[in-house]
Image: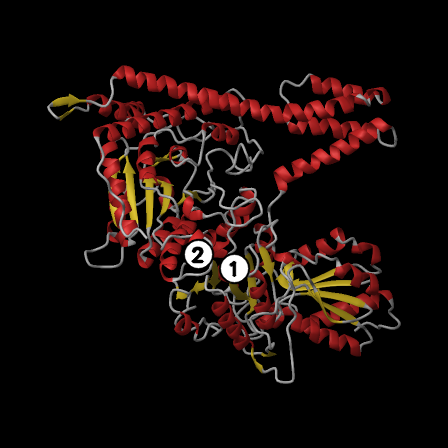
Amino acid sequence: MQDKIATEKVSFEDIKRDVLHDYKLGRISREMSLLGRREVLTGKAKFGIFGDGKELPQLAMAKVFREGDWRSGYYRDQTFALAVDALTVESFYAQLYADTSVEREPASAGRQMNGHYATRTLNEDGSWKDLTQIKNISSDISPTAGQMPRLLGLAQASKVFKEIQFEGAEKFSKGGREVAFGTIGDASTAEGHFWETLNAACALQVPMIVSIWDDGYGISVPTHNQRAKVDIAEMLSGFQRNEGETQGCEIIQVKAWDYPALLDAYSRAEYFAREESCPVVVHVIEVTQPQGHSTSGSHERYKSEERLSWEAEHDGLLKFREWILNYSAELDGKEISIATADELDEIDREAKKIVKDGQKKAWDSYQKTITDLKNELLPLVEALANESTEVSGEITKFKNLVTVAKKEVFHLVRKALIHTRGKNSSAREALQKAYERLFDIEKDNYSSHLYSQSQWKATEVPVVEPIYSDSSEEMDGRMVIRNNFDKIFEKYPQTLVFGEDSGNIGDVNQGLEGMQEKYGATRVADTGIREATILGQGIGMAMRGLRPIAEIQYLDYILYCLQGMSDDLATVHYRTKGGQKAPVIIRTRGHRLEGIWHSGSPMAGILNLSKGINILVPRSLTKAAGFYNTMLQSDEPCVIVECLNGYRLKETQPDNIGEFTVPVGKIEITKEGTDVTLVTYGSTWRIVTEAAKELETLGISAEVIDVQSLIPFDLTNEIAESVKKTNRLVVIDEDVEGGTSAFIMQQIIEKQKAFRYLDSDPITISAENHRPPYASDGDYFSKPSADDIVEKVYALFHESNPVKFPKL
C-alpha cells in the first residue's frame, strides 16, 4: 500500500506537455460553453448552464484527484469532469439535448438538465464496480449546497475503511486513502448545509477538500448581500486549525486566474487531506463568469460596465495564455519557452473544431432516435388514413410541424387510435402493437429505476419466519431490538450506526445499549445535533459500499433532513438510471408519546416527498428488527419508524434473532373478521386491536390489518380481498386528515379497485390537524382513541341497520 503521495522528477518537456494539455482542455471546455449557449438560443436545446470562467481551478483540482477519490459538486464543473475523463464533448451535448441514451449520456440518460455529472458506479446488473479504479463523481443535484451533506459521508468513509475490513472491501477503498472533493458556489455558502457540513467535517477530521468558486454573485445578488462578510475565508478564520490540534480545517485562498498558484494550492490541499486527514477549504477568488449565470438571462442586467470590463481582463484562459507566452527560463544555457502565439492559436482552432465535431455527432445521434421513431410509426398511421378523414387531418398537421420530438410522434399515434376507435382493421392492430411496444421503451427511458431493479431489490429478499419455542424469552421491546443489532453488527462488519446519543449511552431508549463498548466508537457513534448531515453521512458512506444506519432521534426531527431525503437520496437511483445507489437505512422513532415535537406523525410529507425510499412502519420492535434484517440484504434505501411508546412494552424474542425477516410490501391480518376491514399501522395498531375487541361485544366482527409497509404498499392486493369479504372499509392512522390515511385509501379504492365490494362509504379516522398537545391526555383528545374508533365504526352499521344497531 502506498503510504505517501507519489512524487517524481519531471523534465521541462513533461511540464510543457502538461501545460499545453491543460490549455487545450481549458479551450475545449470554453468552446463547449460558448457553443452550448448558442444551441439553446437557437432552439435546439431547452436550457443551458455552464462552467466558463472556472476552467483553471478545475484543471488544478483534477491534477490531485486520483482513482478511488470522490467528488460531490454542482453544475459548474464541466472542465473538471472533462479532465478526469468523466465527460466527453459528445456526452456534454447529449445531456444538453436531453438524450435518453445511457450510452451517449451516461450521467443521467436525459433525466437531468445539463451540467449535472456522475460516473456509473454500478454494473448493469446493479452490482458494484471496482470503485478504486474509477475517479468517482457522485450524481449532482440542482439545489445548491444540497451536495454538501453527502460530501461528509463520502469523506468519512475513508476514515472508516482505515479501521474496518470486510469481504469485498477492496473494491471500495485502498486503505482509506481516498479524498472526497466538494465544490460549491460562493453564494451557496450562505446555506445552512454548508456550515453544518464544514462544522461536522472539522469535528470528525475527515479527508475532504471543499472548493468555493467565488465569482462575487449568486445569480444577480452580489456577495455583500449574501453573507456577513464579503470574504468567506475571513468568515471561516475561526475554523482554521491550530498547530498540534486535531480540530478545525486548513484554509487556502487563491486567485482563479493564477495557474501556478492554483497548482500549488491544490497540491497543499491534497497533502493536508490525504496525509493528515484534515478537511481543507480552497477559496478560489476573482472567478469570472463570461456568459453570466445561465441562458435564462444576461449578466449585463445587473453587472456594471466596470465589473464587466474587469471580468474580461481577468478571464482565466486569457491570463493563462499570457502566462504561457511570457514564460521564459534558462536551461543548459539556452532560453526556453512553452509556446508561441501561433502555436496557441492553432490549439484554439483545434479546440473549436473538436467541439463542433462533437456537438454535431451528439445532435445527429439524438435526432436519429426521433427520426427512427417517426419512420417506424408514421407509415402505420398513414395506413389508417383511408379509414378516417380525421386521421388524414392529423397527418397533415404533423407534417407541417417545424420541429418534431418524441412527444409529437406519440401524440399523432394516440390521436389516430382515438379517431379509429371501434374499428378492427389489420392496419389499426399493427399500429396498436407498435405503439405499445415503443411506448414501453419510452416508459423505461423516462420512468424506470425509481427503485432497484436488481436481484437485491427489497421485495426479492427471502422471507425467514421468526421461530418461537417454549423457551422463547419475553422481554422489553428495547432488548429485542438491541439483541438484533448485536447480531447485525456481528454478521455485517460493514454496518455502522450513528446519531445523537446513539453511541455512549446506547440511544435514548437503550436500543443500542452496550453496542459501542462491544463494537467500538467507529461503528456505533455519537454525532452532534445536526440531522441534515447525519443523513448526509449515511448517503455518502452508502455510496461507497458501507451499510450505514443513520439515526434521527425522533420522527419529528426528520423534517430537518427531509430536503436531503427528497432531493438526493430518493432520486439517486432514478436520476442516474441505475448508475448509482445509496442503500442507507434511516432509523427513527415516532408516533404516540407526549408533546408537540415528541409525538408527531408527519408521514404524509415523508410519503409524498420521498418516493424512491422504502417507508416501513412496524407495529412492534420485533417487526422493526425483522425489517432491519431484510433491508441489510437489499440494495435500496429505507426509513424504519420504530414505535416510540413500544420500548418498555413486553415482547417475545424470536429464537432466530438477527436472522428472521419481515417482507416489505406485505400486509398482515392480525385479527380475522367478517363485517368490516380496519386498516392501520404503527402505534395505532394496538388501539385498533383494542377497539376491535370491543366491537365484537357490540355484534361487529372486525378484521384488523397491519399495513407494515407504506412504500411499497400491499403488493398482492390482500386488503381488497379482505374488503371483498367484509364489504366495509375503515382506515385509521394518527397523521392529519388527508394525510397517510388518504394515501392508503387511494391505494385500496383506486389501485386495488376495492370500491366494487363496498356496501357503505369508506371512511378515514385520523388525528386532529394540529400537533398533539403536551397536556395530560392530549394524545387521547387529538389522536384516534379506541373510543373514537368504536363509535365511528358502529355508526356505519347503525346507518345500514338502525334496528340491529340502535344509535349510541
Q: Could you say which quadrant of the image residue 353 lies in? A: top left
Earlier residue among tags 1 and 2: 2
Q: Decide if residue 369 is on the left or right side of residue 179.
A: right
* Residue beneath the point at 46% across and 59% down: 167
Q: Could you say which quadrant of the image residue 234 lies in? A: top left
Relative to 197, is 489 above or below? below
The front one of 740 and 460 is 460
Badge 2, how many Cα within 10 Å: few under 14, some, many 20+? some
Q: Position of residue 527 (x, y in %)?
A: 39, 63
According to the picture, the residue beneath numbered tag 1 turns out to be 585
Q: Give, as a three-letter code, the residue at label 1.
A: Ile
According to the picture, the residue beneath numbered tag 2 turns out to be 169
Q: Decide if residue 379 is on the left or right side of residue 509.
A: right
Q: Position of residue 493 (x, y in %)?
A: 46, 64
Relative to 680, is 749 above or below? above
* Residue beneath the point at 87% across and 68% down: 801
Is there any visible trace of residue 215 in the rendered image?
no
Relative to 105, is 462 above or below? below
C-beta proximity under 8 Å, tags 1 and 2:
no
Is there any visible trace of residue 335 in the rendered image?
yes
Q: Position of residue 751 (x, y in %)?
A: 74, 51
Badge 1, how many Cα within 10 Å: few under 14, some, many 20+? many
Q: Position of residue 16 (x, y in %)?
A: 25, 27
**For numbered disc 2, what is the local secondary structure?**
helix
Q: Give, as a three-letter code, the residue at label 2.
A: Ala
Name the front one of labels 1 and 2.
2
Q: How many marks?
A: 2
